[in-house]
């Protein structure tokens, strides 16, 4: 969460202009602005998986061989591509959007939901090393927004 202190002077339009430097196709109203930010986050996360731009712990030799035998992608977080394709922004209520995966069953690994897979991948388990893919993107977006806000004369800080 980013907390902004002080008044939005010179005003909303100036604040929108600052955010427009970070989010492409910036809409005019606040709900659409939050939606655009969530969609941007979801796209950046999916792109980081698709392009393998993060440095993650390598897969175990056993799992690499298993993926090869089953004709799956050898890239990290990309076995079938289904998980990556489900990363999207979803509206929860006005001004509240979630960038993530739905809590539905995975068609290949039917015993677990995509939300469970997200937790295993993002935070790791006793057998699977953490491969954070949402937290780094969201942290970078927070830092970018913080820079833009402070550059425009507002005081702001990131709250964890």
Image (cartoon, rainbow, N blue to C red):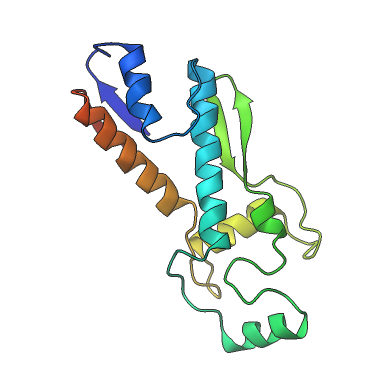
Question: In which quadrant will I find the N terminus?
Answer: top left
Q: Position of residue 65 (x, y in %)?
A: 67, 88
- Horizontal side, residue 158 vs residue 106: left or right: left
Residue 20, percent from left and from top: 39, 28
The residue that appears at 69% across and 44% down in the rendered structure is: 102
Image quadrant of residue 17?
top left
Identify the image quadrant of the C terminus.
Answer: top left
Picture coordinates of residue 63 (x, y %)? 64, 82
Q: Is residue 92 left or right of residue 72?
A: left
Q: Is residue 8 left or right of residue 130?
A: left
Can residue 158 be seen?
A: no
The residue sitting at 62% across, 29% down in the picture is 91
Residue at 77% across, 65% down: 109
Q: Residue at x 51, y 39 (%)?
A: 40
Residue 82, placed above or below residue 68: above
> Is 8 rendered above or below residue 69?
above
Asked if residue 112 lies left or right of residue 4, the reply is: right
- Is residue 82 at all visible to an observer of this figure? yes
Tally of numbered tags: 0
Could you say which is closer to the camera, residue 52 or residue 3?
52
Q: Is residue 29 above or below residue 43?
A: above
């Amino acid at each position: 969460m980013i907390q902004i202190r002080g008044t939005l002077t010179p005003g909303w339009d100036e604040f929108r202009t600052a955010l427009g430097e970070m989010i492409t196709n910036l809409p005019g109203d606040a709900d659409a602005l939050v939606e655009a930010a969530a969609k941007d986050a979801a796209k950046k996360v999916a792109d980081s998986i698709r392009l393998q731009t993060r440095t993650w712990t390598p897969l175990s030799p056993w799992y690499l061989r298993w993926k090869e035998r089953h004709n799956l992608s050898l890239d990290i977080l990309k076995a079938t591509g289904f998980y990556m394709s489900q990363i999207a922004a979803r509206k929860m209520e006005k001004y509240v959007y979630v960038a993530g995966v739905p809590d539905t069953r995975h068609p290949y690994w039917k015993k677990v939901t995509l939300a469970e897979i997200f937790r295993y991948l993002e935070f790791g388990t006793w057998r699977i090393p953490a491969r954070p893919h949402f937290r780094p993107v969201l942290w970078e977006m927070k830092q970018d927004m913080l820079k833009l806000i402070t550059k425009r004369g507002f005081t702001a800080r990131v709250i964890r």
